[in-house]
Amino acid sequence: MRFLTLSTLTILTGGLLAAADSTIVTYIDGNVAGLSPNTGATLYLNNPQSLELKTPLHSVQIPYAQISKAELGSVTPHTPEPEPLYKVWALPKRLVKTETQQMKLAFTDGNGRDQTMTIEMSKTSVDGVLGIIERYSPKVANTSWWGDGYWKTTRNRDTWGGAGTVAQK
């Protein structure tokens, strides 16, 4: 009975953590009121209507429909300070290299003003965040198709010179 309760609670706790859909980020730059540069925050993505950036003092909700641009910035590798070789317990620090990547968001707030925000997060989570934004935001959605690089389609008309006389027939 005790084993069953412990395993059930473990599974339930793991499920709640997986459903949280949050990422630790750093607010780098932007013109969002109330947020100062280099502020640590948590980005919650579990609402299909908006994403939420929470700091200890402020909370900013950004509806996906209001996001006009989301682009990835530079990747920054972080290496720990070198330890002497005799410290064998520091070996995992020497082998692990962490990387962060910036994401720039442009959106309009509730008053209709254009806002920008640059956030930095781990490189492993940035693709998932961008994918969620592309899924829910119609303006940011990636509508490219892999075949556009090989064939002339109506989607890539601007790159090959538009519709000629043969293509119009």
Image: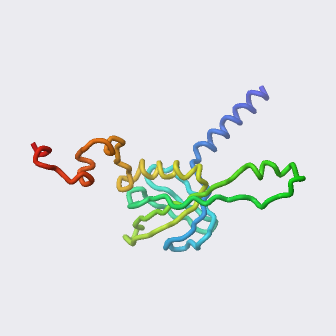
In this rendering, position of residue 17 left or right of residue 137? right
* 23 and 110: which is toward the camera: 23
Quadrant of res 107: bottom left
What's the residue at 19%, 52% (across, down)?
Answer: 162
Which x, y percent locates residue 77?
64, 58
Quadrant of res 145: top left
Which x, y percent locates residue 90?
83, 52
Which x, y percent locates residue 22?
58, 51
Image color mode: rainbow
What's the residue at 46%, 62% (across, down)?
Answer: 105
In this rendering, position of residue 168 left or right of residue 31? left
Relative to 44, residue 18 above or below: above
Image quarter hosting the N terminus: top right
Image quarter hosting the C terminus: top left
What's the residue at 61%, 42% (across, down)?
Answer: 18
Q: Report the number of numbered marks.
A: 0
Pick out the residue farthest to the top. 1
Which x, y percent locates residue 115?
44, 70
* 57 and 155: which is toward the camera: 155
What's the residue at 72%, 31% (across, down)?
Answer: 7
Pick out the residue farthest to the right. 86
